[in-house]
Image (tube, helix red, strand yellow):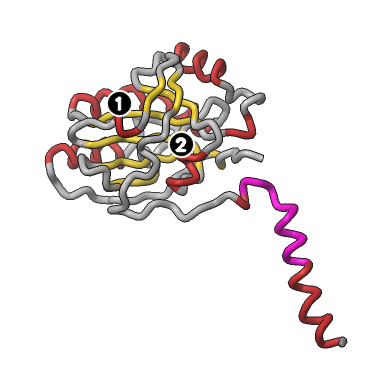
Amino acid sequence: MKKYLLLVIPVLLAVCLYAFLPVEEKVKKDELALGDSAPLTDVEVQDVSGETLTLQEVAKENGLLVNFSCNTCPWVAKWEDRYNPIANIAEKRDIGVVALNPNASYRDKGESMQDMQQRAQKSEYQFYYALDKNAKIAQAFGASHTPHIFLFNGDMELVYKGAIDDNAASAEQVEQPYLKNAIKDLAAGKEIDPKATKSLGCTIKWPR
């Protein structure tokens, strides 16, 4: 009996601890691998303009750039001055651009549609900024942070994922503009290098 209890008690404790983990720790899914097809491309999301769209509709001939972003993360604020220039580089190369807000449990803490509309207007976003209402798309992508970048080619296969560049604090001091280079190489039919970098930012606030 003693041996049985010694085996069972740790298991029960582990189960109990898991039950009380923050939601962020329980929703994690494996991140998309390079070469994977974009999931949930037919799921409708609402843009700050009020327009309803899907990833498939946003995608263009040469691909799609998906940025999981938000309103309240200081890392987003640091990188935000690069959002429009990167979107312009992508659009000029026939790559669609959308930012998705997955912070489902913070909708009443600065991540509502109204907050998004105000952010998009203030920062003069030149790309779609849409609500990933229940973080469904973020979960399918295996996204973990804001910002978190996923770049797909014209066949909607993942060709780059991770960070925007190597210096969130200063656009002027960037030495490795990962995403800009990946977009340009994708459009030119060149090999992307690196294909993956570490995403840095705030953890996504998953639905409770």
Residue 21 is inside the magenta segment: yes
Counting from the top left corner in percent of width and height, residue 108 is at 66, 24
Give the residue at x 19% y 41%.
186
Q: CA distance from mark 2 to mark 1?
A: 14 Å
Residue under the image location 45 percent in, 23 percent down: 46
Residue at the image point whose x is 42% and y is 14% from the top: 49
Look at the picture and state if 65 lies above or below 14.
Answer: above
Q: Is residue 132 above or below residue 110?
A: below
Judged left or right of residue 121, residue 85 is: left
Position of the C terminus, as image quadrant, is top right
Residue 66: where, in percent of width, then height?
A: 36, 35
- First in residue order: circle 2 vs circle 1: 1
The residue under label 1 is which amino acid type? Ala
- The residue beneath circle 2 is 147
Question: Considering the image in quadrants, where does the N terminus appear?
Answer: bottom right
Rendering coords of residue 40 (x, y %): 39, 41
**Residue 121 location, quadrant:** top left
Q: Which mark is residue 87?
A: 1
Of 44 and 122, which appears nearest the observer? 44
SS at badge 2:
loop
Q: Type of residue at label 2?
A: Pro
**Which contiguous range is marked in magenta?**
13-24
Relative to 37, is 200 on the left or the right? right
Find numbered disc 1 in the image and state the secondary structure of the residue it sits on.
Answer: helix
User: Which mark is drawn over residue 100?
Assistant: none
Tell me, yes or no, whether the highlighted magenta stretch contains residue 98. no
